[in-house]
Amino acid sequence: MLFQTSETSDKLLYALMSQTIIPRPIAWVLSDNGDASYNIAPFSYFNAVSTSPPVLYISAGKKPGGFKKDTWKNIEERSHFVVHIPSVSDVTAVTETSASLPFGESEAAQFGIALNAESDWPLPRIANVPAAFLCKRFDIIEIGNQAMILGKVVSTYVSDTIATLSEGRLLVDPIGLDPLARLGNSYASLGELLNG
Ligand SMILES: Cc1cc2nc3c(=O)[nH]c(=O)nc-3n(C[C@H](O)[C@H](O)[C@H](O)COP(=O)(O)O)c2cc1C
């Protein structure tokens, strides 16, 4: 099958891309509602962009009424946000936090997600998630109905339980990280590890 974009609906294009560009990592994003509550939502259109400076992106769409998703709105209005790498054990909470709550309602409170205060940072981090990037908005590029939200990584948290640093060489254990991945509408875990 060959799909000409000009003759293919957005729904089909989404199905094509989201089921073939797989597996995708998941960014579990905490952003600031501006009223001392926090929004949490997963985004699988997510990846690293550059290392120097360290920049990552997530791509957020709009809600059915045409309004920007809360994560997009929050990062546009308040620059700090935190991108977590959820583990397979977080799958239920990740799915729950994709529910569209009215703006300003906190997924953290609604779904009982524990947060850890972070020193020298205005936002907390989701507790028990092994890796997180503390980011500041770098840029927001609107592409059609989506926004490519670029975040500059100000600091990175990796749990001591999965990382070792010896003579400047960092090793993160992928099995310990156990990252949750997105495939179409389902999820996957790491499969067999292959030597590069
Ligand atoms: C695993 C997973 C990945 C998702 N990836 C994206 C994504 O890349 N972009 C997007 O706009 N929505 C994505 N969604 C849907 C959002 O999480 C959902 O619309 C959420 O309500 C947005 O929250 P917010 O309005 O609080 O920002 C994903 C949902 C799940 C479960």
Image (cartoon, helix red, strand yellow):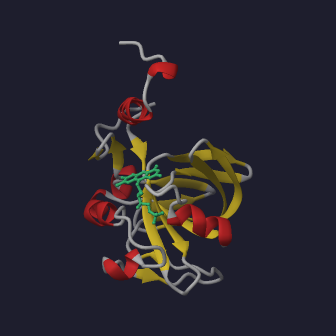
Q: Residue furthest top?
A: 1
- Which of these two is toward me, 28 or 13? 13
**Looking at the image, is 159 positioned above or below residue 51?**
below
Relative horizontal placement of residue 30, taking residue 15 as reference (left or right): right
Can residue 134 be seen here?
no
Residue visible at 65% across and 82% down in the picture: 120
* Residue 115 picture location, percent across and down: 43, 81
Residue visible at 42% across and 65% down in the picture: 130
Q: How many numbered marks are there? A: 0
Relative horizontal placement of residue 35, taking residue 85 as reference (left or right): right
Can residue 143 be seen here?
yes
* Residue 87 picture location, percent across and down: 34, 59
* Residue 104 picture location, percent across and down: 48, 78
**Looking at the image, is 105 positioned above or below residue 29?**
below
Relative horizontal placement of residue 177, taking residue 78 as reference (left or right): left
Give residue 144's quadrant in the image.
top right
* Residue 59 picture location, percent across and down: 54, 49
- Which of these two is toward me, 74 or 178? 74
Residue visible at 55% across and 55% down in the picture: 170
Residue visible at 56% across and 59% down in the picture: 166
Q: Quadrant of ligand 1?
A: bottom left
- Which of these two is toward me, 174 or 171? 174
Quarter of the image where the N terminus is located: top left
